[in-house]
Amino acid sequence: MLTPLDTSGWNRTDIMHEARMQSEALARLGVWKRLAYSLVAVGFILGLWGTNTDQGIAVAIGIACLVVGVPASIVLTVGINRGKCNVENMLVDAGIDVQELLRPRSKKDADAARQVGVKNS
């Protein structure tokens, strides 16, 4: 059985490193989620096409794709959402303002930041 990792002695650098690694893992899981969504779409299309043209094999393959793709999509979506919340909590523990990181950026924001940089130099 797995033993829990003791993170009580971690400093800000350790937390940031772990958050970066988890973010990269979530990005890889996002690729698998898109593949699962594609499998659902292919299954639906094959099933629909097979029923309209009396192609039993297409219906069977479509149903198989749906049986595999739908649960995989659900599991990956839930896992990625919970993982993102975990990374956000880690960043908050590291003292980073997550809301500022997630704030949408515009050209106006970039110009204002550039002006501040020019004034400070």
Image: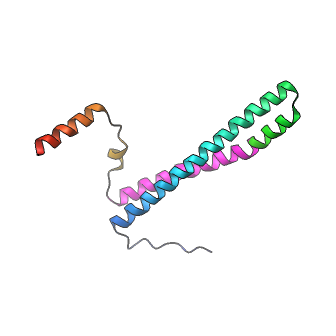
What is the quadrant of residue 53 in the picture? top right
Residue at point 39%, 64% (across, down): 15
Note whether 15 is above or below 113 in the view shown. Answer: below
21 left or right of 40? left
107 left or right of 19? left
Note whether 100 is above or below 49 in the view shown. Answer: below
100 left or right of 60? left
Residue at point 44%, 55% (across, down): 87
114 left or right of 102? left
Asked if residue 44 lies in the magenta stretch, the reply is: no
Give the dominant element type of the magenta stretch: helix, strand or loop: helix
Residue at point 86%, 37% (across, down): 57
Note whether 8 is above or below 108 in the view shown. Answer: below
Residue at point 12%, 45% (across, down): 120
What colour scheme does the image use? rainbow
What is the quadrant of residue 9 in the picture? bottom left
Residue 14 location in percent, x, y?
A: 38, 67
Residue 36 location in percent, x, y?
A: 65, 44
> Which segment is the magenta one?
66-95
Quadrant placement of the N terminus = bottom right
**How many discs appear?**
0
Residue 2 location in percent, x, y?
A: 59, 73
Residue 121 location in percent, x, y?
A: 11, 46
Asked if residue 81 lies in the magenta stretch, the reply is: yes
- Toward the top, the furthest residue is 52
